[in-house]
C-alpha cells in the first residue's frame, strides 16, 4: 500500500478539520489531468466514413439490384433487356371473338351445332376440308341439304360477306379449323380477298353439289 505524501502524513482522519480537508482537496485538484479542449477528430472521421458507405451503397443498390428480380441472381439466366414484350395475339384468338359475336348462336360454344338444324363444326370434314369451299359459304351463304360427317342436315346459312371483312372471315375460319380438336391450316385474308373478287357477281347462296364440284 502506497504511503501518503509527507505533507499529508501528519493529518489523521479522525482529527481532520475542515481546513485540512479543503487543503487536501485543493492538492488533488492541482494533480488532476486537464481535459483536452474541443472534440477528438477520430469519432467524427468514423461517422463521416459510415455515412459515405451508406450513401454510395444505396446508389449501388438502386442501379444494380434489378428491382429484386430473382432472375438477376440466376447464373444461367440471360441478361434481361428491361423491355416488356407485348402478348402474342394469333389469328385464331382474333377469330374466336368473331365467332362469339357472329356464329355461336347457331353452331354453339362447343362447335356441335344443333342436331338436324345447324351442322356441327367440331370434327367436320367441311370445316377442315377445302378452304375455298368454306370461304364461299361464309361469303354467300348455303342453302339445301348438306351431309356432314355422314349425317344429312337440311338448313340454310345466311351470307356474311357484307357483314364481315376479309381478315375477320379468315380469322374466324382459322379458329374453327383449329378448335375442338380440329387440325387444319390457317386461312389467310389474301385468300378471302381473292375469292371475294372472283365471286363478286354471285347473288344466290351456294348448294352442296356446287361446292363439291370445286374439288379439294
Image (cartoon, helix red, strand yellow):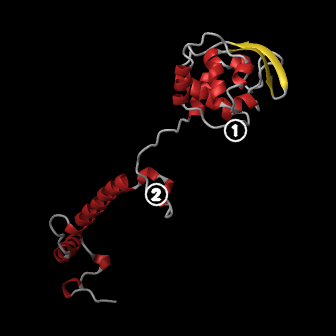
Q: Is residue 216 above or below residue 108?
A: below
Q: Find the distance from the CA under tag 2 to the CA under tag 1.
A: 40 Å
**Residue nearest the viewer, comparing 33 with 103:** 103
* Label number found at residue 200: none
* Label number found at residue 183: 1
**Residue nearest the viewer, comparing 6 with 193:** 193
SS at circle 1: loop
- Which of discs 2 and 1 lies nearer the camera? The answer is 1
Toward which corner of the image does residue 157 lie, by quadrant? top right
- Left or right: 198 as drawn, with respect to 32: right
Q: Quadrant of the N terminus?
A: bottom left
Q: Is residue 54 above or below residue 155?
A: below
- Left or right: 79 as drawn, with respect to 10: right
The number of numbered discs placed on residues in the rendered structure image is 2
Q: Is residue 142 above or below residue 80?
A: above
Toward which corner of the image does residue 28 lie, by quadrant? bottom left
Residue 128 position, x and y percent, is: 70, 33
SS at circle 2: helix
Q: Quadrant of the C terminus?
A: top right
Q: Residue at x 55, y 29 (%)?
A: 191
* Label number found at residue 72: 2
Q: Residue at x 69, y 30 (%)?
A: 215
Q: Residue at x 34, y 55 (%)?
A: 58
- Left or right: 20 as drawn, with respect to 140: left
Residue 159 position, x and y percent, is: 63, 13
Amino acid at each position: 500500500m502506497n504511503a501518503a505524501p509527507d505533507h499529508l502524513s501528519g493529518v489523521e482522519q479522525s482529527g481532520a478539520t475542515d481546513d485540512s480537508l479543503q487543503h487536501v482537496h485543493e492538492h488533488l485538484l492541482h494533480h488532476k489531468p486537464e481535459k483536452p479542449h474541443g472534440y477528438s477528430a477520430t469519432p467524427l472521421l468514423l461517422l463521416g466514413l459510415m455515412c459515405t458507405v451508406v450513401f454510395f451503397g444505396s446508389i449501388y443498390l438502386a442501379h444494380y439490384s434489378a428491382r429484386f428480380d430473382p432472375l438477376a441472381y440466376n447464373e444461367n439466366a440471360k441478361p434481361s433487356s428491361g423491355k416488356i414484350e407485348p402478348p402474342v395475339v394469333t389469328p385464331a384468338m382474333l377469330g374466336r371473338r368473331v365467332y362469339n359475336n357472329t356464329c355461336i348462336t347457331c353452331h354453339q360454344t362447343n362447335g356441335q351445332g344443333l342436331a338436324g338444324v345447324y351442322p356441327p363444326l367440331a370434327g367436320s370434314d367441311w370445316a377442315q376440308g377445302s378452304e375455298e369451299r368454306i370461304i364461299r359459304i361464309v361469303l354467300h351463304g348455303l342453302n339445301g341439304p348438306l351431309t356432314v360427317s355422314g349425317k344429312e342436315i337440311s338448313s340454310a346459312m345466311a351470307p356474311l360477306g357484307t357483314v364481315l371483312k376479309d381478315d375477320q372471315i379468315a380469322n374466324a375460319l382459322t379458329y374453327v379449323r383449329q378448335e375442338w380438336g380440329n387440325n387444319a391450316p390457317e386461312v389467310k385474308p389474301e385468300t378471302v380477298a381473292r375469292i371475294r373478287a372472283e365471286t363478286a357477281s354471285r347473288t344466290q347462296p351456294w348448294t352442296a353439289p356446287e361446292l363439291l364440284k370445286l374439288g379439294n
